[in-house]
Image (cartoon, rainbow, N blue to C red):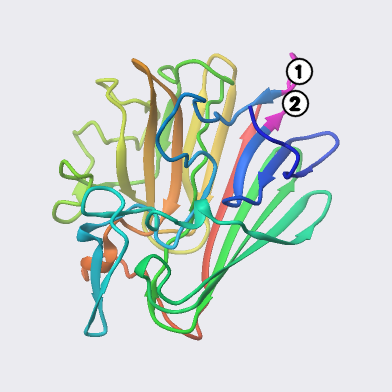
Amino acid sequence: MFDHESELEIGLASGMLVRIDPKGARLTSVVLPSDDGPVELLIGPDPKQKTRDFHGATIGRYANRIAGAQFTLDGEQFQLDANEGGNCLHGGGKGFDQCDWTVVAHWINAATLRLESPDGDQGFPGNLVAEVSFAVSDPETLSITYRACCDRACPVSLTSHGYFNLAGGGSIADHRLKLNAKQVLEVDGEKLPVGGPRDVAGTRFDFREPAPALGPDGAGFDHNFCTGSGGMREVAVLSDPASGRSMTMLSNQPGLQVYTAPSGDSFNAICLEPQAWPDAPNHPEFPSAILRPGVEYVNRIRLQFSS
């Protein structure tokens, strides 16, 4: 399914194997050992798919959507590349997922890649240098760390867009999801936030206890859950009762985009994307996503698998 010729491999002899494509700093494979042989937990793109492929990619400069593909910062208005109707999605038509990242380090169990994004890239201000490090530790833990710095204030929100299926394939209808989130952002028809955070209690968005990952109506999600602030903390647990596998996600980000990927008449994967809140540059009441010179952006993601 994937071209492995240019990919990096990291992992442990007795544990997981991870493959990364420098094109888009993209996870292409996460394999865990099992009693029945290796199991691939990442779902790749449909070969017939005509739309842009975000599977496993690093998303930037700004994950999710910015309304009207514009924002005002320090009194100046910026026009971004509008690649989803009139809005900017995942950094524009040539976001970080479309770029060739430079491999700056590669060890047995870790790799670091770098990208330089020039001033005006997709309309974003300032020169920005981004790095992502992938590391496998313990038999079944994958850590992804994003860092960035800039020479001019700009919105920054990087994330990893991996499509996971803990059964290794088929529908995720039987997967269970638990989220440490008391609030969610409701969205309009363009998937843009409507108003402020809403309590999840009594709604289909309540995952404070494990519940079917597709929701009580099986309709799936493309929503930002508000996961609070602070250091590294558990934000989500995904599990597959049939196989007994689970994935616990830790993050330091204020939001978690939950996206269930459609496949024909069902859903075959789920994305859990730690990030800033969507359209935050146009919502001063949201947690700030503005990176300023002299400050380092850091997004830490840890995936702890259990089989």
Residue at 23% x, 41% y is 200
The residue nearer to you, when weighing 210 against 185, is: 185
- What is the chief secondary structure element of the magenta stretch? loop
Assess disc 2: are there few (<14), some (14-19) or many (≥20) residues with their C-alpha within 10 Å of its C-alpha.
Answer: some
Confirm whether the magenta stretch covers residue 147: no
Of the 4 image quadrants, the one containing the N terminus is: top right
Task: Give the CA distance from mark 1 to mark 2.
Answer: 6 Å
Tag 2 residue = 33
Secondary structure found at label 2: loop
Residue 251 visible: no
The residue nearer to you, when weighing 36 against 191, is: 191
Secondary structure found at label 1: loop
- The answer to which quarter of the image holds residue 247 is top right
The residue nearer to you, when weighing 212 against 3, is: 3
Q: Which mark is residue 123?
A: none
Assess disc 1: are there few (<14), some (14-19) or many (≥20) residues with their C-alpha within 10 Å of its C-alpha.
Answer: few
* Left or right, 289 with reference to 46: left
Can you say whether 124 is above or below 105 in the image? below
Location of residue 117 in the rendering, given as x and y in whole percent from the top left corner: 51, 70
Tag 1 residue = 37
Amino acid, disc 1: Gly
* Left or right, 144 with reference to 290: right
Q: Which residues are magenta?
A: 31-38
Amino acid, disc 2: Pro
Can you say whether 125 is above or below 56 in the image? below
Residue at 65% x, 32% y is 2
The residue nearer to you, when weighing 292 against 99, is: 99
Residue 116 visible: yes
